[in-house]
Amino acid sequence: MRAAALRSTVRVGVRQISQHRRARNMVHVRAQSTTDERRYPERMHHAARAVQLVSKLCRSIQSSLTTSEQVSKSDDSPVTVADFAAQAVIAYVLAKEVPEVGLVAEENAAEMRLDAGADLRARVTAVVNETLSGLIDAPLSEVEVMDAIDRGTSDGGASGAFWILDPIDGTKGFINGRQYAIALALMEDGEVTGGVLGCPNMPSEKIPRGATEIPTASPGCLFVAYKGCGTTASALDVRSPLEDGVKVTTMKVKNASEATYMESWGDSVVAAHGFTNALSDAMGMTSPPVRIDSMAKYAALARGDTNMYLRFPPKTYREKVWDHAAGAIVVQEAGGVITDGSGKPLDFSKGRFLDIDIGIVATSTPELHAKLLETIAQVAQQQQ
Ligand code: AMP
Ligand code: MG
């Protein structure tokens, strides 16, 4: 009885928030109707707010990590608590606001449901309730939190609508006080149509030419894209990201030799600095690479900070959809191009993995993309 009453109270609480938010969005829709731009669908407003909410949770846990000894991603480290809690909050909020849209997400609660997972389960539930405090009428139970996380265990595919979530992308950046991202994409009938990237440590200033890394900054940045609507960037703490943000576009370059590129740090399994260096030399580029953790690289490309994101994992590594889906649409809607290293479009409709040839590349223009693909083919052949 008590559980049923609690669930019912939670439902009413979330319904009240939804009604309030819907009313706000209607004002937003009217305000934009004087322009001929396509409007971001309601789903993207919910997605942006869910990512904003979780960014706060992540910022607070990342700052406590600097004083904690437990910084590896082991069973009950703060990092693991943050991953699970972030996924639970986004899954719970979206299930209430947009129940018809499914979820494919990186984490699952299988181990946490066992007796051995009791401590972690309690900690994750406490963080989730703290984050949702004021938005729901009564705290969620451990079972409700585990169920929210396991909404993300579906396989995705080519039909229907579902979100693709990486609750904390760039764990090494998160642990080491560098960049990381909360990445949420929307798939509709086999195509990535929407994306949100929350980058809680990203400076609002563009990366200066010649820089090899970027500092961390507060409050971070939020990027939202939807097919045909463009990519909007805002500070992470604005009241309404899609009303308060600005449209961003990629940076054009006339000659490939003037281009700049981003890549992963050397501690990443997907870094191949020897190969990217050879590509850079072959294209006559003179600027050093900018090294950034996580999908924040896609955000920086969309905003016009640099011209390319190069990523060449070993052949044995299988890319996951949640590591690229949101970034792909954020870049494309800002005018950029993304494919695998042989020029094939990325197909996010095949389940939880992406099948690719010779890495993943994103560029600021189609011309630069063509030049890059040509160079990859040449350099790969020379290195065989
Ligand atoms: P990046 O921040 O560019 O290194 O890319 C981050 C993503 O690459 C992570 O979310 C992981 O999915 C993947 N990744 C990077 N390094 C590793 C690793 N050592 N083992 C497994 N996956 C990794
Ligand atoms: Mg990831």
Image: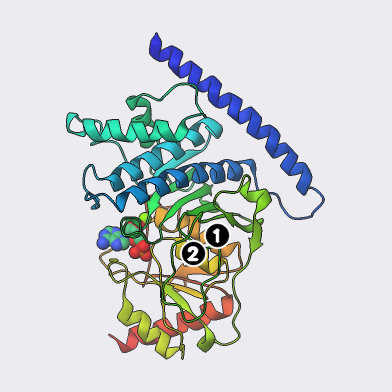
Residue extending farthest to the top is 1
236 relative to 366, above or below: above
Q: Please give left or right for residue 226 compared with residue 198 in the image.
A: right
42 relative to 295, above or below: above
Amino acid type, mark 1: Val
Question: Residue at 56% across / 73% down in the picture?
Answer: 364
What is the C-alpha distance between the residues marked 2 and 1?
7 Å
Question: Residue at 26% across / 49% down in the picture?
Answer: 68
Question: Residue at 34% across / 41% down in the picture?
Answer: 84
Picture coordinates of residue 50, whole percent (x, y) = 51, 41
* Colouring convention used in this rendered image of the protein: rainbow
* Residue 356 numbered mark, or none: none
Amino acid type, mark 2: Tyr
Please report contact status of discs 2 and 1: CB closer than 8 Å, yes or no.
Answer: yes
The quarter of the displayed image where residue 15 is located: top right
Q: State which image quarter holds ligand 1.
A: bottom left
Picture coordinates of residue 162, whole percent (x, y) = 49, 43
The quarter of the displayed image where residue 266 is located: bottom left
Q: Which residue is mark 2?
A: 298
Q: Earlier in the sequence, mark 2 or mark 1?
A: 2
Residue extending farthest to the right is 34
Q: Quadrant of the N terminus?
A: top left
Q: Please give left or right for residue 143 compared with residue 75 in the image.
A: right
Residue extending farthest to the left is 116
Q: Residues within 10 Å of mark 2 (few under 14, many from 20)?
A: many
Q: Residues within 10 Å of mark 1 (few under 14, many from 20)?
A: many
Picture coordinates of residue 76, whole percent (x, y) = 23, 42
Q: Nearer the viewer, residue 327 or 190?
A: 327
Q: Which residue is mark 1?
A: 330
Question: Residue at 42% across / 24% down in the picture?
Answer: 139
Residue 37 visible here: yes
